[in-house]
Image (cartoon, rainbow, N blue to C red):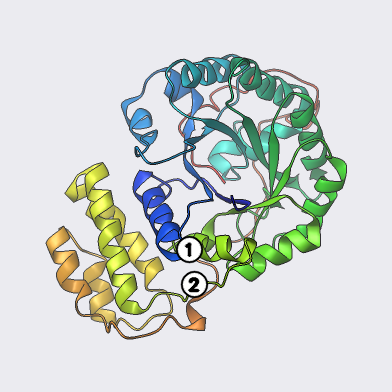
Amino acid sequence: MRSPVVLAPMAGVTNVAFRILCREQELARVGTVSGLYVCEMVTARALVERNASTLHMTTFAPEESPRSLQLYTVDPATTYAAAKMIVDENMADHIDMNFGCPVPKVTRRGGGSALPYKRKLFGQIVAAAVRATEGTDIPVTVKFRVGIDDAHHTHLDAGRIAAEEGAAAVALHARTAAQRYSGTADWDQIAALKAHVTGVPVLGNGDIFDADDALRMMAETGCDGVVIGRGCLGRPWLFAELSAAFNGQPRPTPPTLGEIANIIRRHGQLLANHFGEEKGMRDIRKHVAWYLHGLPAGTDLRRALALVKTLAELDELLTQLDSDVPFPDCAEGPRGRQGSPGSVVLPEGWLDDPDDCTVPFGADLVNSGG
């Protein structure tokens, strides 16, 4: 039975290596793969222009099914071209659209979480992706935030419009852009969206760090599924725990430190396969910090791992960990970016007319999403 769990696209994290690892952990621990694992977000314009780095980001492993790809976009025409390219070239089985990025370099150009305020333009973009996939079995889904700030909520309109334009489901990160990744997600807004949008599934995102959080979100909000972001950083086995919880199975025991060392080794090898050893080892460094969060490793070993350059060196350093240490409760909780709230930078006059359909200039650069 497929669990109602989605891996949120995270820039620099949810590449093919991490997705393979999550799938392997779920299969090994509960005997099935039932989650939906979405690739890193790619920019529609860069995809259409066949940017080499962007095309490399769309790499899927042969065993990945369904292949899920997320687009960042601001322009209906570019959206249609990118979605049509995905269809014509059999690049993915599912298209998700990101309107959640809160970072100033994106919102100041009218992209990311600023864009749903322009409700007609937002609707045109969703409609373009849906039109490009007509006659196929490729669903289009849409992710967004509560709004720009507490004075400018957009999620109810965004959910309604996305559903009216043919989106198969919507997902809400229950924070405003002003919150960024700080504070507490407002799950009441997920419940409000679920009550407002009744024709398609509504998924919730924000502050899910273990299986109990996921079950509680669904019970409290009535949402149809959960989207997992920072909660799985350094814990690719979380999806096995979620699958077991949703399917009424006993939850697998968290890994020991020795098992985590083996998972890190596997992750490093997968990154080396995808990027080459030099870049793969640069990439594994941030993951190691997340893996060892709350675990005994020692300052010198952590420092050495933060500078690791080869797979052989990674393997040697990991042998220094105490393999019998069980996974402690203190290792649970948030990882990754949190930061602090701040005012949202918008283009001049952005809030003047929510029905303005002008495509924001320069907003379709390569950006990270959220």
Q: Residue at the location (27% across, 51% down)?
A: 270
Relative to 90, 81 lies left or right? right
Compare residues 265 and 207 and report the one nearer the observer: 265
Query: In the visual, does 253 lie left or right of 15?
Result: right
Give the secondary structure at mark 1: helix
Location of residue 347 with respect to 128 vertically, above or below: below
Furthest toward the left, the residue is 312
Q: Amino acid at mark 2?
A: Pro
Where is residue 206? Give x, y as percent: 65, 57
Image position of 198 (left or right of 324): right
Q: Using the numbered discs, state the Cα–Cα distance from disc 1 to disc 2 in whole angstroms.
A: 7 Å
Residue denoted by label 2: 252
Residue at 37 percent of width and 49 percent of height:
20
Residue type highlighted by circle 1 = Val
Disc nearer the start of the sequence (1/2): 1
Asked whether the viewer can see residue 338, the reply is no
Question: How many numbered circles are shown?
Answer: 2
Q: Which one is in front, 285 or 253?
A: 253
